[in-house]
Image (tube, rainbow, N blue to C red):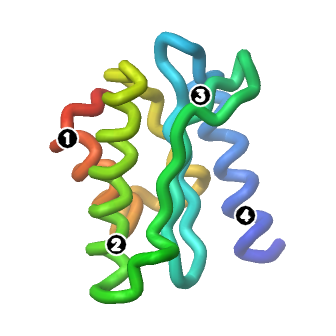
Amino acid sequence: MTTLQKRQQRGKRIRKQIGDGTSQRPRLVVYCSNTSTYAQVIDDIAGTTLVNASSMKEKSGSTIQAAEKVGSEIAKLAKNKKISAVVFDRNGYAYHGRVKALAESARKEGLQF
């Protein structure tokens, strides 16, 4: 099994445990590429993405600093849409580095999970 397949398998296990995102408590999904970090708030029942943010345009600083900016940005956008609580889906990634930085900065901005 490749590393990607293992991560996808872990992601499926995580989604089984946390369940689907609803309109009252949508799912905050994190994806990390080699260069960027992406976050989406998804309502799985309606099948829609409510808000999204990425670090694609951030070219300065480390990937962890960019992930912190994405976390604060996604929290602000969610607050504007009147979303205060989410279910955190780390998508098979370890809660370490970029994923941890994104989650902690989103919590600092007032997003609950």
Query: What is the secondary structure assignment of the residue under circle 4?
Result: helix
Q: Identify residue type, mark 4.
A: Lys
Question: On the image, numbered disc 4 is attached to which residue?
Answer: 6
Residue ID at (53%, 47%): 52
Residue ID at (32%, 40%): 75
**Disc 1 crowd, CA 10 A, few/some/many (<14, 14-19, 20+):** some
Q: Which residue lies furthest to the bottom in this view?
A: 60
Q: In this view, does 82 lie above or below 73?
A: above
Question: On the image, numbered disc 2 is attached to which residue?
Answer: 66
Q: Which residue lies furthest to the left in this view?
A: 108
Q: Identify residue type, mark 1.
A: Glu
Q: Is residue 29 above or below residue 8?
A: above
Question: On the image, numbered disc 3 is attached to which residue?
Answer: 17
Image quadrant where one finds the C terminus: top left
Give the camera-side residue of 34 and 82. 82
Question: On the image, numbered disc 1 is attached to which residue?
Answer: 109
Q: Identify residue type, mark 2.
A: Ala
